[in-house]
Amino acid sequence: MRINYILLFICLLAIFFTCESERDPAPFIPVATCTDGMQNGDETSVDCGGICGSCGEEVSIPTEGYNGSTRYAGYSLLWSDEFNSEQLNSDKWGFHLGTGCPDLCGWGNNEEQYFSDDKENIFLKDGNLIITAKQETLGGKNYASSRIHTDNIFEFKYGRVDIRASMPTAQGTWTALFMLNKNYTINNPGGYWPSGGEIDIVEYLGENHNEILGTAHYGTDFPNNHRFNSVYFESLHNQPFNKVYYLYSIIWEENKITWLVNDQQYHSMTPATTYASGQPYPFNDQFYFVFALSVGGNLPKVNPVPQDFPDCLIIDYVRVYQKN
């Protein structure tokens, strides 16, 4: 009788293990990340939204703001980019990448970002160029963004420049839409800066949403004689620069530069400005564009806060007109 019980127990064990071996293995559940190629957690799309930040879908394009004219008496359109294609036009723009090292580390300003050409940092959306600064570790920096230029692609002398843009919100961001002498390179920054001149069409700091500035840099024998002439401009009609489009312009003529916002003049300079500080006037030469969204640096007075990122600079168009 005892033997029968033992045999029965052995049979039951055999049946149990046979059934267990025939079961499907437990499914593998991957750990959700911001690069797993799936929409999960609080993401609003694949690897976008929530803690993964914005990938473009969440960029809020302004619906209001000032728009410039497409015609000016006595001028013709020379060059423009309306950003209406699917990606940045490489026939019009190049990239400045990295940290500026070894010749211009921190891009000359102790900036805290790594400049990238990744689609997470620069893309086109609804006819706008979007430059996005993100909090991420890249190239030894804690932030990534983009900086583009027209060096050796489009260089010009004199004209009217219009840039329609909406500024970022995060403190610690530094927008600079500016121009450099055609001979300036980041590999030899002291060779033509500031002696070759720099024209800052507009600069903006995310710490103050109601203020921009227009500036020109000049002076020989850097760093002993670096000079700059800068004027601030306040936002109009209770509309901060980060909420609507504004039109940032210069009218650049021989021996004169005039700065405007929404066609309102607020600053100008001539050779008399540079001569007053004993320096030559370098702005009667060809220049090229540089558009950058930086994080940190010498100009911002407030440190960036990681939780404020990602954040975007939105540019609707850039147009260059020259006199007929």
Image (cartoon, rainbow, N blue to C red):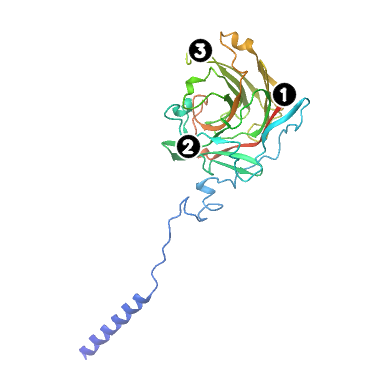
Q: Given the image, on which type of amino acid does mark 2 rest? A: Tyr
Q: Is residue 124 above or below residue 250?
A: below
Q: Check the image and name the residue furthest to the right.
A: 73
Q: Label 2 belongs to which residue?
A: 143
One can see residue 162 in this view: yes
**Secondary structure of the residue carrying numbered label 3:** loop
Q: Who is closer to the viewer here, 42 or 39?
A: 39
Give the quarter of the image for residue 321.
top right
Q: Earlier in the sequence, mark 2 or mark 1?
A: 2
Q: Label 3 belongs to which residue?
A: 225
Q: CA distance from mark 2 to mark 3?
A: 32 Å
Give the quarter of the image for residue 20.
bottom left
Q: Label 1 belongs to which residue?
A: 264
Residue 67 is situated, as x and y percent measured from the top left of the image, at 73, 33
Residue 73 is situated, as x and y percent measured from the top left of the image, at 78, 26
Residue drawn where x is 61% and y is 43% of the image? 124
Q: Residues within 10 Å of mark 1 (few under 14, many from 20)?
A: few
Q: Residues within 10 Å of mark 3 (few under 14, many from 20)?
A: some
